[in-house]
Image (cartoon, grey):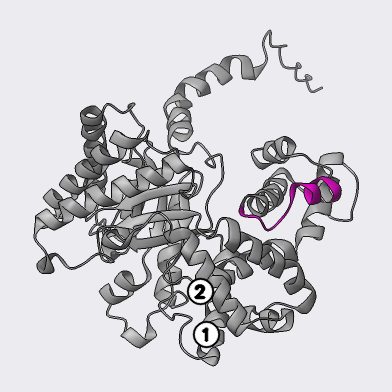
């Protein structure tokens, strides 16, 4: 007769009580690293467009002048709603809702993000002495300070210095130092102020920029960590380092929390890969690859993404303007569909197609997105099972549309049953 196996002895404690503590100790370093390096989405508004203006051409009224020029071009080339719809690639009903909002935006806040440029958009270094850049840095900073005091500066501002490569390093330091001294003599550092660092090739340059920010803060009596910067991704070395790794990922985590954005540079990057000039564009496969690397590297870090620009400008005959608008609107929509919610503009009339495409993107799915988020928030059935990740995406979509002016808060309240606080809470589930 077989002797029965005795039942296992009853444990005094659950396995998790003892083993959980062991796992906590084992994983504590990686838990902390994950929390430090991947804090999640940066709170607050992200601009949808950036204007780069050469430092020697900046005037305080330039943003509003750009808006006026865009309105004049719309009146000349797309004066009626059906003209607007065809030019921007929108259906008639959607175009009607978008057009009024675009006209209002161009009249009140045409430029969201202004970058005073001391790099490629600025006069060649060979054409002027260093003293001229010193003078331009003082003059531009003084004009920006006056605009800040008057309340007419865009909500986001900053400057693009030269790179920290050996040939331009000293000039970049001097320009930043002079600009900040003049700006801070007139006003406090604007809340949305950021420095654009171009042509980054390695993480050491990012570490150097962190050190430079620290020294500038000390010299100008700013709070530690107050200076922020963004990286322009326009070199192949940033996408793929000599060791085969994505160097941009190292750059992100070398920035000591100061990095706010990665801005793709369409033409420098394409040229560096020997893409023929007539083939260089935002929708070239090389651009898609580079942006995909940037996107994966930045995910979860709080560093925001911006697409590049198109150099096909809406100028010339009416037919030329309409063709340029159609191209630009298509490229902006393409960027939005791929999770790049910001981009550069090079000409006043591009503001029209920028906002038309952006507003159309956010309004096209407004009813459906709001209904799905309302169902999730109220736990009612719509035939679609939403998980928290989808709810975050829906809330982010609506919040971005609200921030840029495509959607009104009243629409969110009516369609989704949410106020802004609840919408933001769902965004970070």
Pick whichever, 163 or 320, lies toward us: 320
User: Is the residue under label 1 in contact with that under label 2 (CB below 8 Å)?
Assistant: yes
Q: Is residue 420 above or below residue 130?
A: above
x and y, in percent, of residue 256 in the image:
34, 35
174 relative to 265 in the view: left or right = left
x and y, in percent, of residue 47 in the image:
52, 53
Pick whichever, 191 or 142, lies toward us: 142
x and y, in percent, of residue 330 in the image:
57, 77
Q: Earlier in the sequence, mark 2 or mark 1?
A: 1
Residue 167: name its quadrant.
bottom left
Q: Residue at x 54, y 17 (%)?
A: 21
Q: Residue at x 56, y 55 (%)?
A: 109
423 relative to 313 in the view: left or right = right
| Label 2 crowd (10 A; few <14 / some 14-19 / many >=20) | many
Pick whichever, 246 or 85, lies toward us: 85
SS label for mark 2: loop
227 relative to 289 in the view: left or right = left
**Residue at label 2?**
349
Task: Tell me the tag on residue 22.
Answer: none
Residue 244 visible in the displayed image: no
Tell me the quadrant of the picture where the C terminus can be found: top right
- In three-dimensional space, the C-alpha distance between marks 2 and 1, rounded to whole angstroms, equals 9 Å
170 relative to 227 in the view: left or right = left
Residue 28 visible in the displayed image: yes
SS label for mark 1: helix
Q: Is residue 5 above or below residue 337?
A: above
Q: Which residues are magenta?
A: 404-414
| Label 1 crowd (10 A; few <14 / some 14-19 / many >=20) | many
Q: Residue at x 27, y 80 (%)?
A: 274
**Residue at label 1?**
321
Residue 114: name its quadrant.
bottom left
Q: Residue at x 51, y 54 (%)?
A: 112
């Amino acid at each position: 007769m077989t002797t029965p196996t005795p039942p296992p002895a009853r444990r005094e404690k659950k396995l998790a009580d003892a083993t959980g503590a062991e796992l906590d100790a084992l994983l504590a370093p990686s838990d902390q690293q994950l929390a430090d390096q991947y804090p999640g989405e940066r709170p607050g508004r992200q601009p949808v467009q950036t204007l780069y203006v050469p430092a020697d051409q900046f005037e305080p009224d330039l943003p509003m002048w750009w808006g006026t020029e865009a309105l004049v071009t719309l009146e000349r080339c797309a004066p009626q709603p059906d003209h607007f719809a065809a030019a921007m690639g929108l259906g008639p009903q959607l175009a009607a809702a978008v057009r009024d909002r675009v006209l209002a935006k161009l009249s009140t806040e045409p430029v969201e993000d202004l970058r005073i440029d001391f790099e490629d958009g600025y006069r060649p270094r060979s054409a002027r002495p260093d003293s001229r850049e010193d003078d331009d840095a003082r003059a531009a900073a003084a004009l920006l300070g006056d605009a800040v005091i008057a309340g007419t500066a865009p909500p986001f501002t900053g400057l693009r210095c030269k790179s920290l490569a050996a040939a331009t390093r000293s000039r970049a330091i001097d320009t930043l130092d002079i600009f900040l001294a003049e700006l801070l003599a007139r006003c406090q550092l604007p809340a949305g102020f950021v420095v654009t660092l171009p042509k980054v090739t390695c993480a050491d340059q990012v570490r150097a920029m962190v050190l430079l920010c620290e020294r500038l803060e000390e010299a100008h009596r700013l709070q530690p960590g107050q200076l922020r910067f963004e990286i322009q991704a326009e070199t192949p070395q940033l996408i793929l380092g000599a060791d085969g790794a994505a160097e941009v990922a190292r750059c992100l985590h070398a920035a000591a929390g100061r990095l706010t954005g990665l801005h793709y540079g369409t033409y420098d990057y394409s040229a560096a890969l020997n893409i023929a000039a007539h083939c260089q564009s935002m929708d070239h496969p090389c651009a898609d690859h580079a942006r995909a690397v940037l996107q994966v590297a930045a995910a979860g870090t709080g560093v925001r993404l911006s697409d590049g620009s198109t150099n096909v400008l809406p100028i010339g005959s009416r037919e030329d303007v309409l063709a340029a608008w159609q191209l630009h609107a298509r490229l902006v929509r393409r960027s939005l569909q791929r999770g790049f919610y910001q981009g550069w503009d090079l000409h006043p009339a591009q503001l029209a197609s920028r906002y038309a495409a952006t507003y159309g993107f956010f309004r096209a799915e407004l009813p459906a997105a709001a209904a799905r988020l309302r169902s999730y928030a109220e736990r009612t059935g719509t035939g679609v099972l939403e998980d928290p990740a989808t709810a975050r995406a829906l809330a982010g979509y609506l919040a971005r549309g609200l921030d840029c002016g495509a959607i009104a808060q009243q629409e969110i309240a009516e369609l989704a049953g949410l106020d802004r606080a609840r919408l933001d809470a769902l965004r970070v589930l």
